[in-house]
Amino acid sequence: EAQVTQNPRYLITVTGKKLTVTCSQNMNHEYMSWYRQDPGLGLRQIYYSMNVEVTDKGDVPEGYKVSRKEKRNFPLILESPSPNQTSLYFCASSRGQSGTGELFFGEGSRLTVL
Amino acid sequence: GNSVTQMEGPVTLSEEAFLTINCTYTATGYPSLFWYVQYPGEGLQLLLKATKADDKGSNKGFEATYRKETTSFHLEKGSVQVSDSAVYFCALSAGAGNMLTFGGGTRLMVKP
């Protein structure tokens, strides 16, 4: 089954404790991206990657890091989480770079930073 | 920059009612336009899309027409069902490599 898998789905942590949210896709997609969803703000892009070893900032990259060492994986790293990073996070992937915008989303990771 | 504006929700309708969710956009160039749907507890799924002016996207009884003159992409359905209850996001793609700009989302609640 084609899917984007995120882990963990739910996490409560404390300020400053480094964490990683993993994302894996099994569709051999070149493009992967991370979004955060906050009430009334829709989805805002954090980082994206157009291929292995190619990453770029989205609209709200501050406080986040990513890496793309393999095509299927695109982890999101919070080196020193803060309460304003409490949010619902989505990983997404897409075939190619054609700009069709058809993204496949994971089920989301709800993060709470105390 | 690019932006998408949607009507604020929630929108509450009775089953079989007509649905319209308004969406307008601002973009440079010629964007592609999308509607995504998010069911409770799930990620977003593509509902429909249109890639050029006057195109009509349709799926599952939903329709939206790309109106360049009014920079709009309103979502419509003639007869909603309880199972349509979800959050609907309008989005556009006009940048490099699949970058999507989303609206704030509109929650639809359909009552039996």
Image: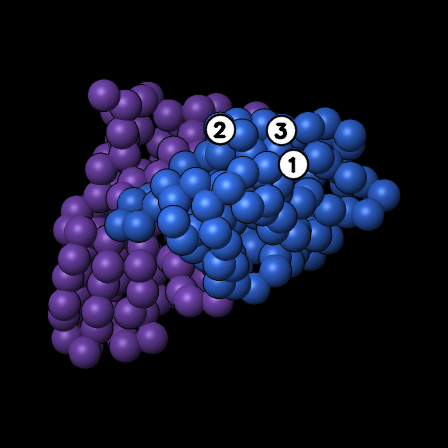
Chain colours: A purple, B blue
Above/below status of B72 relative to B61 = below
Q: Which residue is mark 3?
A: B57
Task: Give amino acid for label 3.
Answer: Gly
Query: The N terminus of chain A is located in which quarter?
Result: top left
- For this view, does B85 lie left or right of residue A17? right
Above/below status of A37 relative to B89 = below
Q: Chain of mark 1?
A: B
Q: Which residue is mark 2?
A: B60
Toward the viewer: A59 or A56?
Answer: A59
Residue B95 lies in what quarter of the image?
top right
* Contact flag, marks 1 and 3 (Cβ < 8 Å): yes
Q: Position of residue B112 (x, y in %)?
A: 38, 49
Toward the viewer: B34 or A81?
Answer: B34
Describe the element under mark 1 as helix, strand or loop: strand
Task: Give amino acid for label 1.
Answer: Ala
* Contact flag, marks 2 and 3 (Cβ < 8 Å): no
Describe the element under mark 2 as helix, strand or loop: loop
- For this view, does A61 lie left or right of residue B102? left
Query: The C terminus of chain A is located in which quarter?
Result: bottom left
Q: Position of residue B76 (x, y in %)?
A: 61, 41
Q: Chain of mark 2?
A: B
Q: Say which label, 1 or 3, has the lower sequence index.
A: 3
Crowd band around label 2 with a 10 angstrom C-alpha radius: few (<14), some (14–19), many (20+): few
Q: Chain of mark 3?
A: B
Describe the element under mark 3 as helix, strand or loop: strand
Q: Nearer the viewer, mark 2 or mark 1?
A: 2
Q: Which residue is mark 1?
A: B64
Q: Is residue A33 visible?
A: no
